[in-house]
Image (spheres, helix red, strand yellow):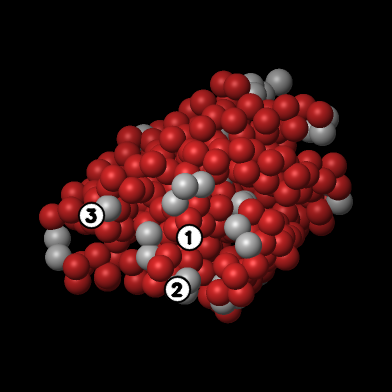
Amino acid sequence: MRTGVAWMERHQVPLYLAGLALGAMVGLLSSDTVARAAEAAIHPVLALLLYVTFLGVPFGRIGRASRDGRFLLTVLALNFAVVPAVVWVLSRLVAHDRALLVGVLFVLLAPCIDYVIVFAGIAGGDAERLLVAAPVLMLAQMLALPLLLWLFVGGDLVDAVEPAPFVEAFVFIVAAPLVAAALTQALAARTRVGRVWEHAASATMVPLMVATLAVVVASQIAGVGSRLGAVLLAVPVYVLFAVVMTVLGTIAGHLGRLDATGRRAVVFSGATRNSLVVLPLVLALPAAMDLAPLVVVTQTLVELVVMVVFVRLVPRLIPAP
């Protein structure tokens, strides 16, 4: 078993690319029923992935990480002062289409609080501090998103947003796996069965990431392809956002006088967005905004490819001492 886990960890990037390719093939060649089943599987698979991710974070050391106010302040400033300015500038490229603009704003204004922990950890970033920051980032974006949308688009859109899917996604995708992982670690510290379970579950990290990538792509690629001309206009915005935030995140980490693992985590936090949690919100918008969910999903597809690149790129940009 250990040999298989070590092999998967050494070849995780090719495996993730294979997951993307498999999801694309299934989504393009299968029926709508398969796509709907894959969409229904996104949140359960993501919850399992985060459960396994949280198992790798020693909860006993979270207290120390939570006292790192410099890291938390850097992440908050980057995501809620720098990012809105960058998004406003980049969103001018799609401002001519209201639905396209709304989709871009929804996804780019919301910092990631789930699989950013996975990818940052793979790249040698500080997953513990990102875990501590996740609830703060979630609460901050719930408060800031309506205000930013009101400033960028108008009050009528804010009135159409239903917050219940946002809270439900946070509870199911983040809070429940977090509590389950903490209980598992407590059980593992006291019983042999708990230790066996913890080791077995931790070994599923790479397969679960592959499964997450596959179901996300399989569920949405057909819809994206059906309106490819419209959603492609958002792709340059997403790519530019990733490039700009890589530079600004690196600068922010340096200005915050963080160590290498902290700076890597800051780069990932600034560049990744909360698409899978925001998607239920966007799906609840009026019918006139039916393009917006596809725009959000397109960001997911772009970001997944970007994250695979980041796993290799960020450690080279910010080498360990």
Residue in the foreground of this view, choosing between 25 and 176: 25
Residue indicated by mark 3: 226
Residue at point 32% right, 39% down? 17
Left or right of 296 in this view: 316: right
Q: Which mark is residue 286?
A: 2
- Identify the amino acid type marked 3: Ser
Left or right of 289 in this view: 278: right
Residue at point 38% right, 59% down? 291
Residue indicated by mark 1: 276
Find the distance from the CA under tag 1 to the CA under tag 2. 19 Å
**Circle 2 — which element?**
loop
Say which quarter of the image contains residue 35.
Answer: bottom left
Q: Position of residue 104 (x, y in %)?
A: 50, 51
Residue at point 63% right, 62% down? 154
Question: Relative to residue 193, is residue 264 depicted above or below?
Answer: above
- Identify the amino acid type marked 1: Leu
Give the number of the mark in front: 1 or 2.
2
Q: Earlier in the sequence, mark 3 or mark 2?
A: 3
Residue in the foreground of this view, choosing between 68 and 251: 251
Q: Position of residue 21 (x, y in %)?
A: 25, 44
Badge 2: residue crowd in 10 Å (few <14, some 14–19, many ≥20): few
Badge 1: residue crowd in 10 Å (few <14, some 14–19, many ≥20): many
Question: Relative to residue 77, is residue 13 depicted above or below?
Answer: above
Find the distance from the CA under tag 3 to the CA under tag 2. 20 Å
- Identify the amino acid type marked 2: Pro
**Circle 3 — which element?**
helix
